Amino acid sequence: MVLLTAVLAVAPSLITASAAQAHGFSSVVFADLSHDDEGRTVTTLQLEYDLLIVSAADTQHDDALFRAGTAAFADRDDDAMAAAVRDHRDTVARYVDDRFTIGTAGDSGGACTASAIGDVTMTMQEGVPYVVISRVEQCPAAEAHIVRSTLFSDDEGYVTGTKTILTYDIDLHTGSAALDGSTPEFSTAQSTWERFWEFFHLGAEHLLTGIDHILFLLALIAGSRKLREIVLAATVFTLAHSVTFILAATKVVSLPSIVIEPTIALSISIVAAWYLVRLWRKGEAATELSRDSGPLGLDRAGWLRLLVVFCFGLIHGLGFASALGIDEPWSWTLLWSLLVFNLGIEAVQIGLIALVFPLLVLLRRRAPRIAMWATGALAVAVTLAGLIWFVQRVFGWE
């Protein structure tokens, strides 16, 4: 009851949250380390364009970059955006050099020296313009590289919790890593356990900070009549989103964010409204299974609900994949990283179910009418939040 009350207490703020805030007002940097034909270290960065412009212009006091960059962004002109970065590459380089460093480990190790920014191109990540810059690093000989990233840090005041997703094929090591404010540094000689924890933590944090995914899960819990229903729903949801998560992250399937994000919001409303319809039709009997229960102890309504959860799970998997944005060929190392990220998601999901559902069962036994009104109010709040997010995401409103 306490947890349900707390959710209802913050429901007004959830309903008025924007589409961007539903996932947290943050950013993701994509970094790739490799060797060129001459054995030199090559760094390729993908940076959110408008954020780079305001951050670099502000910290390096370059008003001309701000004016040119924001004008190009307003026009959504890729050529003009790339030109703004090229014309002010020294400013951009100083900003990046302060916040993204590469060095080598060992007695002969030291800091790498980056060349000038080479070609500048534009790309898209989840419908957001990103600038792509590459630089050659002159590094002392060593057995491992050390990467440190504090790009778009919290203290700049523009975003919070920026992630740097690093992929590397260097020093006879290939893999992926996730850097953030709490773990800003990575070594290519890092242990398997350290890499495991980074991606596990990233997956758990993504679900915890994804209000829309949490509300979807709460709607499932509130509408579950028996333990077997929420267990089966969680299992089906996990299987569905795991499949599309891996396929999307490895670029086997792809859907634009303008389709994925509104559908996720709509799924929240549908699952919550499903429970409201049952409450309206059956009242206090809404928590009881029909007598014509079939396989696994579910009635027709329960099986239909599982089908809906499975379909929406497929869409949520595409949303989970967008958190990583890894763009590299299939490999067992990549699959390992994705599976660990998914384990982090599942740990939070299982924890939330284990915490909330027993409390709900206890409340239904001791005060069924209060439980009905509490879960009904929660379903109303979640339905409205999902509908508002759906409209915001369809029209691109913040």
Image (cartoon, grey):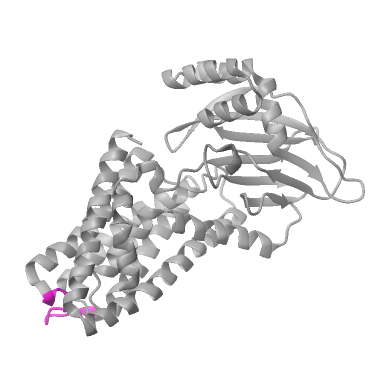
The x, y position of residue 70, in whole percent, is 49, 20
Asked if residue 376 shows in the view, the reply is: yes
- The single residue placed furthest to the right in the displayed view is 107
Q: Is residue 294 magenta?
A: yes
Counting from the top left corner in percent of width and height, residue 248 is at 45, 48
Magenta-tinted stretch: 284-295
Q: Name the residue at 16% across, 80% down.
A: 293
Quarter holding the N terminus is bottom left
Q: Please, which residue is most extreme toward the left here?
A: 281
Is residue 275 found left or right of 47 in the rendered image? left
Quarter of the rendering containing residue 332? bottom right
**Vertically, is 273 above or below 45?**
below
Residue plotted at (92% across, 50% down): 107
Image quadrant where residue 5 sits: bottom left
* Residue 275, magenta (yes or no): no
Q: Residue at x 34, y 38 (%)?
A: 258
Q: Quadrant for the C terminus, please.
A: top left
**What residue is drawn where x is 45% and y is 33%?**
128
Q: Report x, y in % for residue 42.
A: 72, 35
